[in-house]
Image (cartoon, rainbow, N blue to C red):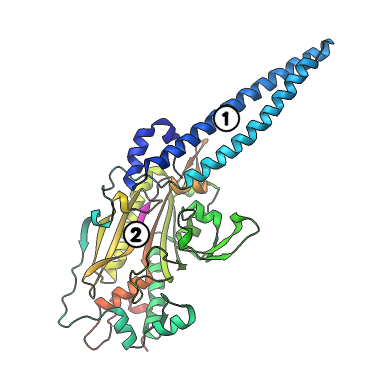
Amino acid sequence: MIDLKRVERDYETFYAQISRKMVERTLLESLKTKLLEAKRLRRELEEKQTLQNRLSKEFGALKVSGGDVSALNAEVVENKGTIIALTDLLRSAENALDVESLNLPNPPDPDAPNGRDENDNVELKRVLSPRIFDFSPKPHYELGVERGWLDFERAAKIAGGRFTVMRGFAAKLERALIAYMIDFNEARGFKEAWLPVLVNRRSLIGTAQLPKFEADLYLAETGDLPENDLFLTPTAEVPLVNLFYDEIIPEEELPIKLTAHTLCFRKEAGSAGKDTRGMMRQHQFDKVELAALVKPEDSEKTFDEMVACASDLLTSLELPHRHVALCAGDMGFSAAKTIDLEVWIPSENRYREISSISNTRDFQSRRAKIRYKSGKANRLVHALNGSSLAVGRTLIALLENHQQNNGETLIPKALEPYIRRG
C-alpha cells in the first residue's frame, strides 16, 4: 500500500513518481480528496470529543454545587449525538480511502528506467552465448510430442486448453529441476518452506494480487466472510510473505530468506491469443520462489543476492540468458524495482522471461502489516520476491537448448545426480 503521508506531504512529487507507472492523475486526485475528507472528519471528531470531556467536567461540577444542569445536559446529549454521527462518517470515509489506496501501485524507484512497455526495458548484460546448431532445432512442443514426453491433447480432455500432461523423461525432468532448484537456493541461504496451495483473500490483498488481478485468480471456495474466501495460489510469493502477516519480528531474526516450490494457478485472462502452443503460458505450472523480509538498509544488497542466485542457477544449467531492467511502465503493480532474467529459446530465436526479481520496498509490508522491532520503535520491513525459477519454462529451455539431432536431450552436469533415465 502506498504511504498516504507521502501523498499528503508532497502531492506533486508523489504524482510525478507514480505517474511513471501510467497512473492517471484523476485516480490520485480522487485519493487525495478522500484523504482530506477523512482528515477533516477526524479533526472535527477530536474537537467534539475534547468538548465532550470539558462539558462532562462542567456538568459534574455544576451538579455537585446544586446548580441547574438542564441546559448543560441538553448540550452534552446533543454533542454526544454529533460524536456518534461523526464516528460513523469517519469510519465510512476511512473505508473508502482504504479501498482507493489498494488500487494504486507502488511508485517505481527513481533509478528505474522510464518507459511505457516492454519495448522500453533496458538490457543490462548477457550470460553465456546461445548455441549455434548444425541442424534446425525443434520447438519443445514438437520435440516433446514426438518423444512421448508431452501430451497436450489428453490434458485438454481432462482440463481444457493450456494444461499439459508430462510423462517419462519430461516428468522426471520436472521433478529433478524442482529438487535441484530448492537445494541450490538453500545453499545460497534461503531456507526451504512447504506451503498450502490455497490462500485467503486477505493474503492476496497483502501482496497486492487483489483487488487488481482478481480476474486472473481461481476462486476455490467462498468463505463465511469475504476475507475468508480461498483461492488457488498464483505464486508462492503470496503464502511466503503472508507467513508473517500482522507480526512484529524481532530485529535479530532478520533477514528472513525463504524458498519454496508450489503449484501455481492463473487464468491468464489478459493474455488471450498469446503462447497458445506448448507450455510457455499455462493455467497450472510449477514454480520455485525466493522471498525475503529485511531491514530497509539491507534491501538493495538482498535484491542483488536474489538476482545473482537466479542467474547463477541458470548458468549452472548451461542456459544462455540475459538481465533486463524493467521500465516503470512495464513493472509489476507492487514492484519498486524489477530485474527480469530472460532465457534463450532457440526455436523462437529470442529471449523469454523465466524469472522476475522485484523489490517492493515497504509496499507489501504496509498492506500486510509486517514490522520489526527497532529499539523501542516498530518499523516496516522491506519485502522482496523472485522466481527461481519458473520450472516449466526451465524445462522448455533445457529441451530446446540441449536437444540433439536424434531427438535426445543432454542433461547438464549439475542436474545429473537428480535424474535417472528410463
What type is the residue that disc 2 sits on?
Answer: Ser
Q: Secondary structure at mark 1?
A: helix
| Label 1–label 2 contact, CB within 8 A | no
On the image, which quarter does residue 14 sit in? Answer: top left
The residue under label 1 is which amino acid type?
Arg
Q: Nearer the viewer, residue 228 or 320?
A: 228
The residue at the point 34 percent across, 35 percent down is 13
Q: Is residue 399 above or below residue 87?
A: below
Q: Is residue 252 magenta?
A: no
* Residue 414 visible to an observer of this rendering: no
Question: Quadrant of the image for the C terminus?
Answer: bottom left
Using the numbered discs, state the Cα–Cα distance from disc 1 to disc 2 in whole angstroms: 41 Å
Question: Which class describes the residues within 10 Å of circle 2: few (<14), some (14-19), or many (20+)?
Answer: many
Count of labels in the image: 2
331 in relation to 69, above or below: below
Return the disc, 1 or 2, that comes first in the chain's sequence: 1
Q: Which residues are magenta?
A: 356-361
Q: Which residue is mark 1?
A: 42
Q: Position of residue 370 (x, y in %)?
A: 51, 47
Q: Is 183 or 74 nearer to us in this picture? A: 74
Residue 356, disc: 2
Query: How far across and down, in percent of the image, does residue 66 sit?
Result: 85, 11
